[in-house]
Amino acid sequence: MTLKEIAELLEAKVLCGQDRLNEEHETAFASDLMSDVLTLGDYNPVILTGLCNMQTIRTCEMGNLDIIVLVRRKKASEEMIEEAEDEGMVVMESDFSMFKACGLLFKAGMQPIF
């Protein structure tokens, strides 16, 4: 599934990384616990989270994860967007709940990591 398809499916606003929207991604992971995100090892899934602060960006940087979908109507700060842009990340905002976003992605063929 392309990042553009993900954005359309989740009715998400793409805040940064528009130049990467044609990239294909097969897996996703949803969590508000950044300690869980750090356990993903070599995977590079689409991360869905309602945690909307600099910790989210920093954790994804440390874990070499670069696609973040903020759910539950969370709005990224300018500082978050600037840091994500500097790191070449894709950040989106969706008004959907995490449950709905995950369900839609799974139904469309996105796979879980485990």
Image: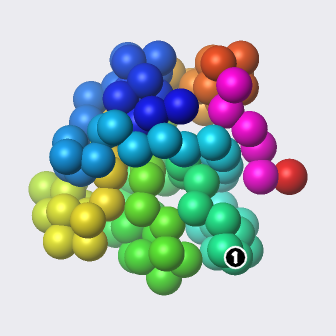
Q: Is 82 rendered above or below residue 103?
A: below
User: Is 110 inside the magenta-drawn segment?
Assistant: yes
In this rendering, does residue 74 appear at all? Answer: no
In this rendering, does residue 57 appear at all? Answer: yes
Which residue is painted at 62% across and 25% down in the image? Answer: 105
Task: Give amino acid for label 1.
Answer: Gly
Q: Position of residue 28 (x, y in %)?
A: 64, 45
Q: Where is residue 39 in the image (x, y as percent from the top left)?
A: 73, 74
Front residue of 67 and 98: 67
The residue positioned farthest toward the right in the image shown: 114
Q: How is the image coloured?
A: rainbow
Q: Is 49 rendered above or below residue 63?
A: above
The residue positioned farthest toward the bottom in the image shown: 62
Which residue is painted at 42% across and 76% down in the image? Answer: 61
**Quarter-wise, where is residue 89 in the image?**
bottom left
Which residue range is magenta in the image?
109-113
Q: Name the residue under label 1.
A: 41
Which residue is painted at 48% across and 41% down in the image? Answer: 24
Q: Position of residue 14 (x, y in %)?
A: 25, 36
Q: What element carries label 1?
A: loop
Q: Where is residue 56 in the image (x, y as percent from the top left)?
A: 44, 64
Front residue of 101 and 28: 28
